[in-house]
Image (tube, rainbow, N blue to C red):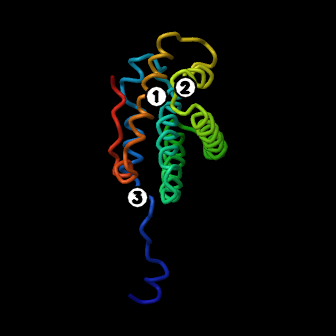
Amino acid sequence: MNLFQRLFARQPDPRQAYRPAYEAIVARGRAPAWYLGGVPDTLDGRFEMIAAVLAHVLLRLEADPAMAQPSVHLTELFVDDMDSQLRLIGTGDLVVGKQVGKMMSALGGRLTVYREAGGEAAALRAILLRNLWDGDDAGEAIDRTAARLAAFAAALSPLSADTILAGQLPDVAD
């Protein structure tokens, strides 16, 4: 390989190793069980569920100091995906960066409150009521969603980081 080829050769993207985990996160966040259980099937509802699943995966990986870099890569994949999704729905270039920034801020907020909730359904209910239903109590839908999210968090706990990064996440269906 000559100097020119070495300087301009494409380097493999280290994030690609974490794509199976990210795709599993999105699949779990888009699982019909959430929406049949009452989560609004809207852009905001979908974002909220993907962010909730991602946040719980990141919190589980947080328990292993060796998983700091994989967590960063999963977050970067999320940013790239949200950027792409915004562009697909017609959001203009000048607005995409601002919207992605808001989404990252929302994810950071979710990480904080989900960490504090500790996987407890009652605490998750309050978070979901505020963030997903904007304070409008949806009764059983919130209870089902909180219980399902608590079960997901509990099922993540015993999984090894390697299992999670391979995309083998717990199912969210009852």
Mark 2 or mark 3, which is nearer to you?
2
The quarter holding residue 170 reads top left
Q: Local crowd at mark 3 within 10 Å, few (<14), some, or many (≥20)?
A: few
- Establish if 170 lies above or below 84: above
State the residue position of label 2. Answer: 124
Which is more N-terminal, label 3 or label 2?
3
Total residue callouts: 3
Q: Residue 150 carries which label?
A: 1
Question: Is residue 9 left or right of 122 when viewed as pictured?
Answer: left
The residue type indicated by label 3 comes to: Gln
The quarter holding residue 13 reads bottom left
Quarter holding the N terminus? Answer: bottom left
Q: Where does the image place residue 133, in percent across and percent down from the top left? A: 58, 19
The residue type indicated by label 2 comes to: Leu
Q: Which mark is residue 16?
A: 3
Which is more N-terminal, label 3 or label 1?
3
